[in-house]
Image (cartoon, rainbow, N blue to C red):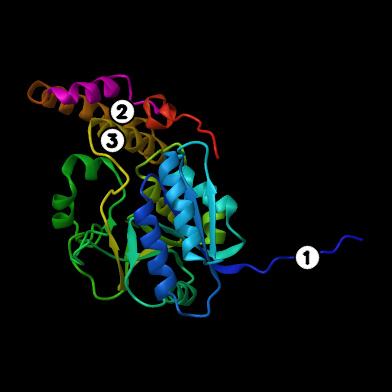
Amino acid sequence: MEANLTLKPIDVSCIIINFNTTSYTLACLQSIIDLEESAINYELVVIDNASQADDYKKLKEGILQLNNDRIKLFRSKKNLGFGGGNMLGVQMAAPCKYYAFINNDTLHLEKNTLKELMQFMESNPSIGISSPQMLDQDKNFRVTIDHFSSLGREILRRPLLEKLFPKIYLNRKKFYESPIRVQYVQGSYMFTKASAFNHIGGFDDNMFLYYEESDVSYRLLKQLNLSTYLYPQLSYVHYKSASTKKGIAIKIEQKISLLYYTKKHHGFIQHRILLSYYIIRYFFSSLFKPRYWKLFSVLVQGAPLSKSLKQQQQLHEID
């Protein structure tokens, strides 16, 4: 007879993606190791998202120097983006109660952050995702919460909605002193119930870089009635977009993900209205800023997923 062995889940699996930013990744790992003094059982799953060979070599060497058996390193042959990279981390993670999706360009600031978030979630079973307050590298306030994308948010804009409907659209630029229910939190730090996350299928990796966190919070709310909360008693530093280059290609990627998200959650009509709005807007923008012609061209084609950066990624050999 075969032994019927059931692995006991660990408490937290922290999933961290590296893409050509090893120094940030190692600092992130060190901050967690130094400050998590509690007895909870956690692991650190590092996914290298097809970085350049030199960066990956530095990552392997740095992790060896950290000499911590909680760290598990895996390298993807292909840049899978934010959602895809995190889903690879989920596949490589041990069975766990919670996932902590943590950007590599972040630092823990308080002791036992993982333990405190876990206790907060276990005391509030109606919560699916929580996040500490985000700070910049100088430890100043940074916006951590946001509103689900909609025609209203994209056309009327956030400040007006927050002024007209303050109970629905919370002030994003306010520092909250106690836990508060929000629509979603930034993907730089998401602490989520593993069972719920797995139930909804995790991140939608059709979106290569943007709106994945909003999509997850929206589906947790609609499918399982689980809310997202900001937990401001804890905070973390986030070095903004350390691994993402700016430029028109990133702006195109944002619009592709946004329009995909809109069609997925709000249907064909709202998708067409928003697409038409952007076509008109960026036609006139292009007259004054020619760099926007490329974005306008993608929008005229319907901003299909085939134009996403995801389709431009190549396979790399793994040493």
- Please name the amino acid that badge 2 sits on: Arg
Disc 1 to disc 2: CB gap under 8 Å: no
**Reading the chain from its start, which is encountered first: label 2 or label 3?**
3
User: Which residue reaches farthest left?
Assistant: 288
Q: Distance of mark 1 from mark 2, alpha carbons?
A: 52 Å
Mark on residue 250? 3
The image position of residue 26, as x and y in percent, is: 40, 59
Q: Residue at x 46, y 68 (%)?
A: 126
- Residue type marked 1: Leu
Mark 3 neighbour density, 10 Å: few (under 14) some (14–19) many (20 or more): some
Q: Position of residue 132 (x, y in %)?
A: 33, 67
- CA distance separating discs 2 and 3: 22 Å
Tally of numbered discs: 3
Q: Which residue is mark 1?
A: 5
The residue range painted magenta reads 290-305
The quarter holding residue 141 reads bottom left
Secondary structure under badge 2?
helix
Residue 222 visible in the snapshot: no
Please, what is the three-letter code of the amino acid marked with disc 3?
Answer: Ile
Which disc number belongs to residue 272?
A: 2
**Residue 167 vs residue 313: left or right?**
left
Rendered residue at 52%/56% (across/down):
197
Given residues 310 and 46, the one toward you in this image is 46
In terms of sequence position, does the residue under pointer 1 or pointer 2 come before the other?
1
